[in-house]
Image: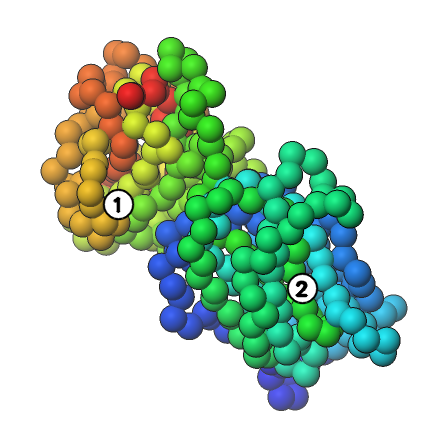
Amino acid sequence: MAAPNAPVGTIINARPAESVPEFATRYTNLAHEDFGAKVLFCTDEWFAAASRMLQASEPVFIVGKFDDHGKWMDGWETRRRRNGGHDFAIVKLGLPGVIKGFDIETSHFTGNFPPAASIEACYSETDPTEDTVWTEVVATTSLNGDSHHFIEISDERPWTHLRLHIYPDGGVARFRVYGLPKCDWDKKDANELIEVSALENGGRVVAFNNAHFGVPFRLIMPGRGVNMGDGWETRRRREPGNDWCIVELGHAATVEKIEVDTAHFKGNYPDRVSIQAAYVTNSTDQSIVTQAMFWDTLLPEQKTEMDKQHYYGAEQIRDIGPVTHVRLNIFPDGGVSRLRIWGKLAK
C-alpha cells in the first residue's frame, strides 16, 4: 500500500511475508522466470502484463507512475469485467516437477485484488490445447489485498503447466510454485558423470549459516553467474570460525569432479574452501545441520582466487564412497557464484 503523501516516483517495497511455511523455504520456485517459466496465454492483461507475476524480484509500488492504460502495477492486472465470467492465465513451469505449495501474492493490490482464485494443473510434453485435461490442485480460495497466500498441497504427481483462475478479475503481484524438479534417473547412464548437485537434477540447498548479500539456491543454478548478485555471499565475519552451506544432491553418487566458481567476486571471494560430505538417511533438515559438523572431508582446504572457476578432480577429492549431501565451507567468509558436484550414480 502506498505511503500517504509519498512523492511522485517513490518506490515502495513489498512488506515481508509473515509466517512463511517450510515448503516456501525448503523447495524451489518452479515458476521462476530464470528457469524459463513463462505465461503462454491469459484472458486479459489490460493494466499489467501477466509475465510480471513470474519475476524474481520482490514487487514494488511506484508512486505516481502511470502508462497509457492507467496506473502502472508490478504484477498481472486485468480490466474490470462487465460481461460475466472470470480471468485466467496459463503458465508453463520452468522446471517440471512435483508441487509442494503455492504463494499467490497480492502485495500493493488493495482495491483491485481478486476476491478468490483456484489452480489447475496438467502434464504435457507440448503446450496445452483445447483438448488438454486439467486437474484441479487448489480449489477456489479466498484472497485478501496486499498479502501473501501460502497454500500447501499433497500430490506426488509431476506437472508441467498450471492454469491460475482469478474470480472475477483483478491483480496478482507474484505467482510462486514451490516444488521438486522432476528427474527421470532410470534414463541416466550409471557410468556417466552427472551433475547431481544441479537444481534441474533435484539438487536442493538444505541450510546455510548466513546469506546477507546473496541467495544460496543460486549456487546450483545452470550457467555462470551474470553479476556479483548472482550467487551466495555472506556478511563480513568479525568473529572466529567460517561460513557454510549444505546441499542435498538429486541422487546419491560417488563424487569424481567438483567446481567452485567465484565469478564476479573479486574483493570478497573466500580465502579458502573445503567440502564435507555424507550418505544421509532418515534425517530432518534441522538435524542435518548438526550432523554436518562431523561429516568426512571430501575436499580438503583449497586456496581460491578471484573471479575464477576452480576445478578439482582425483588428485584433490578423497574417496569416501557414495554421498547424498555436501557441505561447502568457505574460510572465513565471502561469496561463491556456483557449486557443481559431478559423480557416478550410486545404486
Q: Quadrant of the N terminus?
A: bottom right
Q: Is residue 142 left or right of residue 317?
A: right
Q: Amino acid at mark 2?
A: His
Residue sitting farthest toward the bottom: 4
Q: Is residue 57 visible?
A: no
Q: Which residue is mark 1?
A: 243
Mark 2 and mark 1 residues within 8 Å of each other at the beta carbon: no
Q: Earlier in the sequence, mark 2 or mark 1?
A: 2
Q: Position of residue 270 (x, y in %)?
A: 32, 37
Residue 255 location, quadrant: top left
Q: Nearer the viewer, residue 78 or 63?
A: 78
The residue that appears at 44% across and 19% down in the rendered structure is 188
Q: Which residue is mark 2?
A: 165
Circle 2: element type:
strand
The residue that appears at 43% across and 23% down in the rendered structure is 186
Q: Is residue 307 left or right of residue 106?
A: left
In the image, is residue 55 above or below residue 298? Answer: below
Residue 190 location, quadrant: top left
Q: Amino acid at mark 1?
A: Asp
Q: CA distance from mark 2 to mark 1?
A: 43 Å
